[in-house]
Amino acid sequence: MDHFSTWSARDNDGACKCCTVGALEDVKHFVVDCPKYAAVRKELIGSLTKLFSTGDAKGTEFLSVLQGKNKNNLLKLILAHEIDHSKVICKKFDKLVHCFLYEIYEIRNSFIFSSKKLSPLNTCVKSGVNDRKVSAKN
């Protein structure tokens, strides 16, 4: 993950431009710490909690990460390339996380580059996923 730790739009000091915390804008801050994305992150965690409320051991394991205080474990779960669960849950997980990342990226860029027209990431649209209306039920 180290090669993702730099962003071209950061201030020279590397501080996040989207919040006033003064934290280095690295992947961890962007995905699990930045207060600018707290509402979207809360939505994702709520949807993932519903998704993993399966009553089985794997679901319980994922729920403990979602409800825990360890942000590094949460980051690992969100950015996991594969999760060890059923194909149906994996597919829903992928859609939820993809749309979360898309949305926080758009929030970040619209905040930083508010005067510029951005080209959208079309993958959420192409996959038929509406980023604000995806739920564990889809």
Image (cartoon, grey):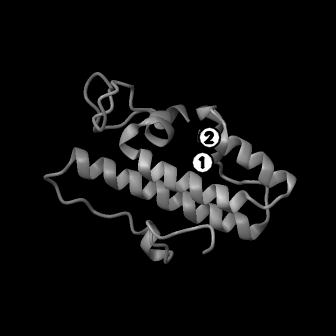
Judged from this view, the residue extending furthest toward the right is 57
Residue at figure coordinates x 79%, y 61% from the top left: 54
Residue at figure coordinates x 32%, y 27% from the top left: 15
Image quadrant in which the N terminus is located: top right
Residue at figure coordinates x 57%, y 51% from the top left: 45
Where 32 sits versus 63, above or below? Answer: above
Instruction: Tell me the distance, in whole angstroms, between the alpha carbons under discs 2 and 1.
Output: 6 Å
Mark 2 neighbour density, 10 Å: few (under 14) some (14–19) many (20 or more): many
Which residue is the site of mark 2?
A: 74
Image quadrant in which the C terminus is located: bottom right
Quarter assignment of residue 136: bottom right
Visible residue check, residue 15? yes
Which residue is the site of mark 1?
A: 78
* Image location (x, y in percent) of residue 81: 65, 52
Helix, strand or loop for disc 1: helix
Residue 115: which numbered mark, if any? none
Instruction: Please report contact status of discs 2 and 1: CB closer than 8 Å, yes or no.
Output: yes
Residue type highlighted by circle 1: Ile
* Image location (x, y in percent) of residue 90: 70, 63
* Image location (x, y in percent) of residue 24: 39, 26
Visible residue check, residue 79? no
Residue type highlighted by circle 2: Leu
For this view, does 111 lie left or right of residue 78?
A: left
Where 132 sits versus 81, above or below? Answer: below
For this view, does 115 lie left or right of residue 23?
A: left
* Image location (x, y in percent) of residue 34: 41, 37
Where 100 sits versus 130, above or below? Answer: above
